[in-house]
Image (cartoon, rainbow, N blue to C red):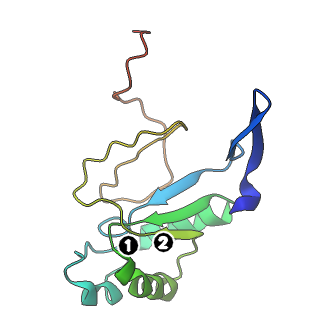
Amino acid sequence: MENFLEEKIENGERVSPILPENVKNYLIDIDGTICDDIPNEEPERMLTAEVYPDALETLNKWYEEGHIITFFTSRTEEHREYTEIWLKKHGFNYHALLMGKPRGGNYHWIDNHLVRATRYNGKFTDLIEKTASIQVFDDGEHH
């Protein structure tokens, strides 16, 4: 993944590298997003979860287009092996698997980089442009 990143210098100092504008860094949930929603309390079901075919097709297309695919799940480290076996069995191409996302939803991600969040609601497709209302920090510039 490091080879995607470009060095960035601000005020003569090296800062966190950035991706080229044409490469997206996708963070994808697993349960209820790419397959059946399996709770951590029933890990034995993780190996037999039904895959959502449209998610597999779309994510592998994004991977082939050169985007970074990272699965970000509330499953814990003890579920990593089952999760990797399942992803491989179903043919998902990805760069990384991050475990331990906080459970319960209602996420509000704060970062110094631009973040776009897209709620999955039953259909995995290429993303489309849509205008929506968002919450932001009050920087004194009201529009």
Is 58 in front, or is 118? 118
Is 84 in front, or is 63? 84
Residue 6 shown left or right of residue 41 in the figure: right
Q: Is residue 48 above or below residue 12?
A: below
Residue type at mark 1 is Tyr
Q: Position of residue 122 (x, y in %)?
A: 30, 59
Q: Which residue carries the number 1 mark?
A: 52
Residue type at mark 2 is Leu
Q: Position of residue 21 (x, y in %)?
A: 69, 41
Is 106 in front, or is 93? 106
Quadrant in the picture for the N terminus: bottom right
How many numbered dots are placed on residues in this image? 2
Q: Is residue 63 above or below residue 23?
A: below
Q: Position of residue 39 (x, y in %)?
A: 22, 75
Q: For the residue labelled by badge 1, is the local secondary structure a helix, a strand or a loop?
A: loop
Within the image, what quadrant is residue 135 found in? top left
Q: Which residue carries the number 2 mark?
A: 56
Residue lying farthest right? 12
Q: Position of residue 30 (x, y in %)?
A: 37, 69
Q: Are marks 2 and 1 in contact (CB under 8 Å)?
A: yes
- Alpha carbon distance from label 2 to label 1: 7 Å
Residue lying farthest front? 13
Residue 58 in sight here: no
